[in-house]
Image (tube, grey):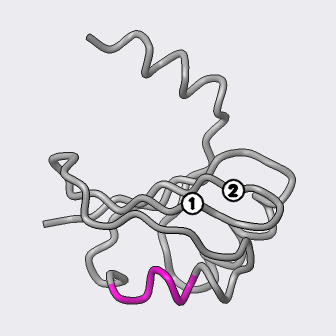
Amino acid sequence: MALFVGLDVSLKTTSICVVEADGSPVWEGKTESEPIALGKALVGWRQRIALVGIEACPLSEWLYGALVGSGFQIVCIETRHAQRFLSSRP
């Protein structure tokens, strides 16, 4: 089954949430907000990860480019838009 990853980025650390396609959690953790650290945290699921979502922030462009360069499919999400979408769901 495909996995989906959400990255909540801050200046020092990034929170990572890996979920199955049905939404069931696989792993939650934190790592440094560095491309190498993120790559190491995700490498165990690399073949199963369908999509990585990263929030728009000052580090997003740097991390986005590094993850795309490592072969991950990734989208950048504006958090205010995502919040509005999620709050409209039943």
Q: Which residue is mark 2?
A: 9
> Quick one: SS at disc 1?
strand
Decide whether the magenta segment is chiefly helix, strand or loop.
Answer: helix
| Residue type indicated by callout 2 | Val
Q: Position of residue 52 (x, y in %)?
A: 47, 61
Q: Residue at x 54, y 15 (%)?
A: 84
- Estimate the spatial distance between the alpha carbons at disc 2 and disc 1, rounded to whole Å: 7 Å
Q: Position of residue 61 (x, y in %)?
A: 79, 61
* Quarter occupied by the N terminus: bottom left
Q: Nearer the viewer, residue 81 or 41?
A: 41
> Quick one: SS at disc 2?
strand
Q: Quadrant of residue 68?
A: bottom right
**What crowding class fits label 2: few (fewer than 14 Cα within 10 Å), some (14-19), or many (20 or more)?**
many
Mark number displayed over residue 83: none
Q: Which residue is mark 1?
A: 15
Q: Nearer the viewer, residue 37 or 72?
A: 37
Q: Earlier in the sequence, mark 2 or mark 1?
A: 2
Q: Quadrant of residue 70?
A: bottom right
Query: Does 47 sit above or below residue 79?
Result: below
Q: Quadrant of residue 47?
A: bottom left
Q: Is residue 63 left or right of residue 42?
A: right
Question: Which segment did they paint magenta?
Answer: 39-44
Q: Nearer the viewer, residue 74 or 39?
A: 39
